[in-house]
């Protein structure tokens, strides 16, 4: 066959397109991916036929599917399809704009090439116009109710000048280009324009056609008012002294620049105002649009591209370097512009600077010589790369603290779901790893640390904590374990809990526990007594994933317990209970032929406590979300099911009291958003002693960041960065003429080949030992797993500490008094846990 990679890319389209055709033929409305695949594959078939030109297919592509054939969200999320194929004259691109352009189309065209008979009558009902409204559009940005325009470049002088293009070609000038330095064929009063630029939105431009004269409004440049680059007519600080003006005029004359003094004083113009909706389209939402703070300077926003602001001498300084040596400024390595940051620390709009793999600043980026308000830690220079964050959401990389190391393929699945850090254990698909997150013993820990070295996520290994003897536990910590895991399948008795916690206290690592489902050594109260007032991280606190039946969930009332959920029970909806029995049987090596095994499994599945878990998550009583990957959990759905739970709770319980109290706008849900983002970012980082490096979008933290389109937030990210370098990204056919040629797939990128972009977390006492393992990953110790720094004594300067506890869990520190009826499984009191009664809040099988 002699195939090459680009042909396999097109084969992917063909396979998925044929699948979509079969589904369409049986009356199933298509989702986004199916619609893209079907249209793309039909276009490929038409290209192969050789009867159509590119222009024909651009039009024809809008008539393959109608609105009634796709889910209501698809016309909004599917704005463009670009495919390439081999025409008789070579490879060319077909770009289809607004491919779902009408209500009804001929299904014969949609099924072209499939050999599937076309139905005599279109089986699809007419689409509901309410479903297709812009208000219900996925990722719709709710702008401020105020209709006020946004004023740009406030407080700066403005003038209006007449400009004529005396050249024979068009001239287009960008907003921040120093107007004095523009094309010599433009004739205007250049002395009046000295120190000014176009008064237009940042990145916009003005076009002068040949022979055209037009009046333009100019505004003073900002910052230090220093001109760099351009045609070098007037470099340096703006200086209007007569001698300097004479020098500039001589330069204009010598270089034959069009210059004609105006006899009248320049007209003073009104400040430029831009409608809020237009501003949002260009740069994203701002203050007033449910954004708590915007660090930008209106009119000096940074953006990259043809005619945009990040160019030499305008938004990019000409006088900067990576080190700052022999230059005025030290510049960032990478900047993410105009990002909407969602983090426990706030929901803000800002530029994000990255330097040496860490977040160097969050604020206003750019060139301090020409822009106002530029953060010294966010200066853009010749050594700076740009990632456009306009109309994108940026979050910290997710942290999954409950990963069974069954398969290295979990890494790419987790990355593509927005995770950048795994904590767990195991040695591959061994019988014990399928059930427990324990890497048992120093030799296995060493080998697994080495095995993780070239996998592009941060990792911490949990050793086996199930031993009443301390010596074996200490050996594992000294070998590099970042924590110890107690599991009932290895033993979760009083002796085990006490010994493990003593060792963890001694070596400052976290103890994680999966308690005794069988109540073999005692009920939940006995385990609480064994723990005492020592901090512990409890896995799947509801109990379906394992733990004292039926009331392990009551442990959320303890202030020293850091409770977590695993994602199969998140949220409680149709089918949640039904899938769990077989999960338990397989994960824990049980047999359906043994009645006691079946009883053990059944005792863990309780609709009542799963429903209660929803509410406990929403009220902030369960602090962490994790997966339990391939052992009763899905590693790629930690983020997805977190927001799934948040949405269900919003539909069921309405707005949180904290949101109602803080704002009169009924659209505000920012407190709930910060509560849920904390569950898989900062809180697991704090619990596991990693928050000094990861877990939030804050200055000084490692730049493990996730970029999302609002329409796919929480489901599928656009890009994931590791230490500021792109690890995975949505990308098209590598042979494509541009990066958006279908099939668009999440693909591994260059950071996956740089182990030092990820961290191996180990115990502090094992650092020297782990250095001998030959790792290329960064090796960092976990810190503060047992006690946290709270400040310094004002008199002595001594660092003060207190025990780590649930109160340190951001937005998730509630400790409700509750228990569970051992016969009915109903959680009490009802006033605290207003349990779900509508189990099918996301629909029933019949729709």
Image: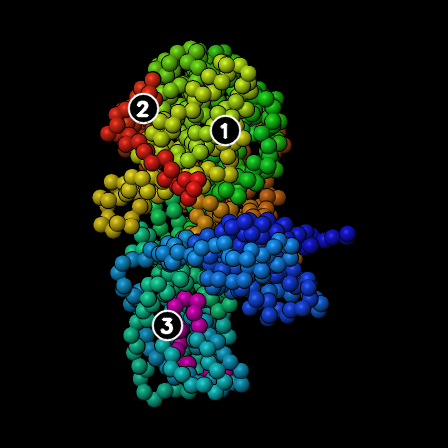
How many callouts does the rendering have? 3
Instruction: Looking at the image, tell me whether mark 3 or mark 2 is earlier in sequence order.
Output: 3
Decide: is 395 above or below 165.
Answer: above
Residue at the image point whose x is 32% and y is 58% from the top: 143
Magenta-colored span: 185-205
Secondary structure, mark 3, is loop
Residue at the image point whose x is 46% and y is 74% from the top: 173
Location of residue 647 (image quadrant): top left
Q: Residues within 10 Å of mark 3 (few under 14, many from 20)?
A: many
Real-space CA distance between mark 1 and mark 2, rounded to the nearest whole angstrom: 24 Å
Secondary structure, mark 1, is loop
Q: Does residue 195 show up magenta in the picture?
A: yes
Q: In this rendering, would 213 be left or right of 5?
A: left
Residue that mark 3 sits on: 199
Secondary structure, mark 2, is loop
Residue that mark 1 sits on: 632
Q: Residue furthest right?
A: 1
Decide: is 793 above or below 131.
Answer: above
Residue 347 has which mark? none
Q: Main secondary structure of the magenta part?
A: loop
Instruction: Looking at the image, tell me whether mark 3 or mark 1 is earlier in sequence order.
Output: 3
- Residue 633 image offset from top left, x and y in percent: 49, 31
The residue lying toward the viewer, choosing from 466 and 685, is: 466
- Residue 783 image offset from top left, x and y in percent: 44, 30
Residue that mark 2 sits on: 826
Quadrant placement of the C terminus: top left
Q: Does residue 525 show up magenta in the picture?
A: no
Residue at the image point whose x is 33% and y is 25% from the top: 556
Location of residue 113 (image quadrant): bottom right
Decide: is 497 above or below 321.
Answer: above
Q: Is residue 586 visible?
A: yes
């Amino acid at each position: 066959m002699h195939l090459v990679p680009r042909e396999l890319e097109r084969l992917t389209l063909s396979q998925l397109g044929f699948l979509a055709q079969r589904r369409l033929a049986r009356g199933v409305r298509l989702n986004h991916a199916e619609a893209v695949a079907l249209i793309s594959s039909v276009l490929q078939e038409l290209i192969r036929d050789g009867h159509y030109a590119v222009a024909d297919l651009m039009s024809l592509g809008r008539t393959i599917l109608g609105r009634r054939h796709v889910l209501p969200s698809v016309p909004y999320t599917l704005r463009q399809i670009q495919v390439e194929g081999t025409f008789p004259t070579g490879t060319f691109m077909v770009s289809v704009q607004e491919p779902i352009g009408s209500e009804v189309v001929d299904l014969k065209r949609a099924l072209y090439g499939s050999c599937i008979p076309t139905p005599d009558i279109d089986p699809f009902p007419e689409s509901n116009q309410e479903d297709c409204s812009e208000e219900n559009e996925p990722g719709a940005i709710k702008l401020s109710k105020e209709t006020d325009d946004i004023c740009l470049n406030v407080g700066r002088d403005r003038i209006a000048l007449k400009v004529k293009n005396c050249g024979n070609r068009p001239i287009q000038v960008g907003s921040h280009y120093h107007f004095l330095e523009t094309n010599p064929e433009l004739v205007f009063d250049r002395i009046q324009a000295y120190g000014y630029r176009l008064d237009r939105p940042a990145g916009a431009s003005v076009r002068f056609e040949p022979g055209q004269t037009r009046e333009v409004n100019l505004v003073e440049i900002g910052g230090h008012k220093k001109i760099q680059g351009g045609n070098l007519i007037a470099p340096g600080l703006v200086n209007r002294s007569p001698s300097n003006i004479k020098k500039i005029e001589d330069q204009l004359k010598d270089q034959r620049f069009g210059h004609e003094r105006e006899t009248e004083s320049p007209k003073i113009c009104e400040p430029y105002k831009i409608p809020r909706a237009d501003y949002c389209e260009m740069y994203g939402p701002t203050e007033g649009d449910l954004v708590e703070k915007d660090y930008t300077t209106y009119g000096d926003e940074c953006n990259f591209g043809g005619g945009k602001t990040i160019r030499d001498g305008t938004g990019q300084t000409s006088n900067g370097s990576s080190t700052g040596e022999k230059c005025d400024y030290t510049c960032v390595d990478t900047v993410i512009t105009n990002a909407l940051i969602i983090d426990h620390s706030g929901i803000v709009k800002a530029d994000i600077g990255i330097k040496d793999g860490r977040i160097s600043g969050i604020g206003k980026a750019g060139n301090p010589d020409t822009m106002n308000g530029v953060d010294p830690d966010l200066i853009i220079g010749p050594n700076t790369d740009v990632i456009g964050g306009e109309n994108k959401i940026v979050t910290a990389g997710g942290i999954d603290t409950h990963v069974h190391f069954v398969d290295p393929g979990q890494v790419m699945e987790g990355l593509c779901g927005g995770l950048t850090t795994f904590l767990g254990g195991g040695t591959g698909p061994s019988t014990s790893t399928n059930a427990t997150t324990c890497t048992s013993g120093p030799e296995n820990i060493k080998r697994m640390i080495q095995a993780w070295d070239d996998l592009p996520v941060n990792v911490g290994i949990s050793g086996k904590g199930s031993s009443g003897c301390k010596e074996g536990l200490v050996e594992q910590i000294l070998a590099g374990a970042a924590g110890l895991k107690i599991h009932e399948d290895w033993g979760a008795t009083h002796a085990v809990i006490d010994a493990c916690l003593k060792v963890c206290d001694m070596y400052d690592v976290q103890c994680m526990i999966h308690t005794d489902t069988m109540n073999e050594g005692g009920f939940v109260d006995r385990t609480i007594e064994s723990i005492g007032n020592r901090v512990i991280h409890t896995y799947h606190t509801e109990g379906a994933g394992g733990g004292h039946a039926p009331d392990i969930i009551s442990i959320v009332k303890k202030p020293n317990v850091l409770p977590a959920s695993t994602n199969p029970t998140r949220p409680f909806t149709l089918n949640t209970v039904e899938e769990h029995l077989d999960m338990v049987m397989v994960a824990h090596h049980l047999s359906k032929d043994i009645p006691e095994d079946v009883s053990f499994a059944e005792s863990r599945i309780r609709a009542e406590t799963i429903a209660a878990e929803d509410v406990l998550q929403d009220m902030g009583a369960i602090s962490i979300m994790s997966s339990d990957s391939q052992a009763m959990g899905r590693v790629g759905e930690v983020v997805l099911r977190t927001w799934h739970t948040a949405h269900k709770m919003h539909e069921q319980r309405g707005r949180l009291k904290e949101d109602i109290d803080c704002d009169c706008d009924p659209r505000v849900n920012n407190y709930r958003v910060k509560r849920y983002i904390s569950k898989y970012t900062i809180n697991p980082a704090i619990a596991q002693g990693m928050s000094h490096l990861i877990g939030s979008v804050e200055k000084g933290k490692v730049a493990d960041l996730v970029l999302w389109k609002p329409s796919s937030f929480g489901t599928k990210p656009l890009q994931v960065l590791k230490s500021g370098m792109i690890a995975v990204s949505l990308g098209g056919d590598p042979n494509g003429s541009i990066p958006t040629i279908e099939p668009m797939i999440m693909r591994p990128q260059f950071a996956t080949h740089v182990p030092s972009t990820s961290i191996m977390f180990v115990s502090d006492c094992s650092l020297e030992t782990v250095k001998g393992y030959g790792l290329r990953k960064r090796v960092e110790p976990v810190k503060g797993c047992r006690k946290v720094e709270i400040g310094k004594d004002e008199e002595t300067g001594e660092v003060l500490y207190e025990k780590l506890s649930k109160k340190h869990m951001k937005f998730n520190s509630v400790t409700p008094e509750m228990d569970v009826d051992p016969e009915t499984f109903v959680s009490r009191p009802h006033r605290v846990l207003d349990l779900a009664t509508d189990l099918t809040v996301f629909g029933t099988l019949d729709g």
